[in-house]
Amino acid sequence: MENPVTSPVCVAPVISFAKVACAIQLAALQSEVDLLLRNPSPGSAPNSWVDHVNKQDYIGGWDVLPLRCQRQHVHAHPILQGFAIAGGDTWENLPVLLQCPELQNLFDQLQCPIKAARLMRLKARAEIKPHRDHELSIEFGEARLHVPIHTSAAVTFIVDRKIIPMRAGELWYFNADQVHEVYNYGSEDRINLVIDCVVNDWLREQIRVGAVHE
C-alpha cells in the first residue's frame, strides 16, 4: 500500500526582533526620566534605583527603577517591585508614574495587557553578558518591549548574533528566549524603558508586521 501524500507543514520563522509602531514624544519622555533621576517619586529618597539582582550576568553598573509591579509588592522594597514575578498575576502602576504623563501615554497605546515595567540603566562602559530569559518570547505568550530613552551609537544590543538597530524614541520587541547581550562602549549611561506584556492578537500582528529579517 502506498504511503499517502502529505502536504509540507509551514512553520513561521522565529522572530528575533521587531519594531512596533508607537507615537513617542522623545523629548517629553527624556524630561520625565531626567526628573526621575533627580527625584524618583514624591516623598522618596533621592535615589530609588536598585542594582540588577543577576550580578553574574553583567560587568560594570546595571540598575533598575520599577514602574509597575505585582499588587502585593506595591509597598515593598524596590528589589521585590523590580524582580518578583511569581505568586500572582495582578499588576499595578507604582506611585512614581503619577508624575510621568508621557510614560502613561505610551502604556495607553499598547492594546495588550501590561505586566512589569521598569527603567533599566546600563552605566557607561558596562556590558550585559550573553544570556537567555527562558520562555520569554511571543512563542510562549509573553513579550518584552524596549524603548531607548537615553542611548548613543556606542551602545550595541545583540540578539541571536544580530544587532538590533534600535534608536532613541523607538519601541522594539526582542526575543529574550534567544541569547542576547548588550555593550555600552560610550561615556554616557544608557537608559531604556522595558515593558513585559501578555501576547494577544494585536501585539502578535504588530510584531509580525515590524519584524526585521536578516
Image (cartoon, helix red, strand yellow):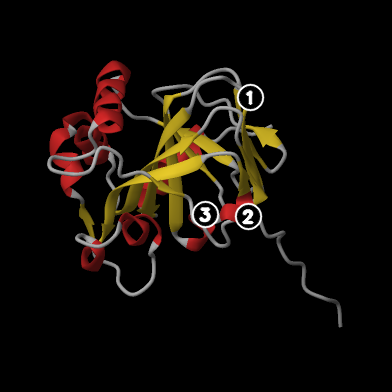
Which is nearer the eye, 174 or 95?
Answer: 95
One can see residue 100 in this view: yes
**Residue furthest to the right:** 1
Q: Which residue is drawn at the image coordinates 27% and 51% (left, top)?
A: 68
Instruction: Point out residue 42 in the picture as x, y percentages from the top left corner.
Output: 13, 40
> Is residue 13 found left or right of 85 in the rendered image?
right
CB-based contact (under 8 Å), mark 1 and mark 2: no
Between the C-alphas of marks 2 and 3, the distance is 22 Å
CB-based contact (under 8 Å), mark 2 and mark 3: no
Q: Name the residue under label 3.
A: 137
The kind of residue tagged 1 is Tyr
Please tell me in which quadrant of the rendered image residue 129 appears: top right
One can see residue 12 in this view: no
> Is residue 13 found left or right of 22 in the rendered image?
right
Instruction: Point out residue 200 in the picture as x, y percentages from the top left corner.
Output: 36, 54
Which is nearer the eye, 204 or 65?
Answer: 65
Q: Residue 56 carries which label?
A: 2
Question: Tag 3 or tag 1, which sits nearer the N-term?
Answer: 3
Question: Tag 3 or tag 2, which sits nearer the N-term?
Answer: 2
Please tell me in which quadrant of the rendered image residue 11 appears: bottom right
Q: Residue 185 carries which label?
A: 1
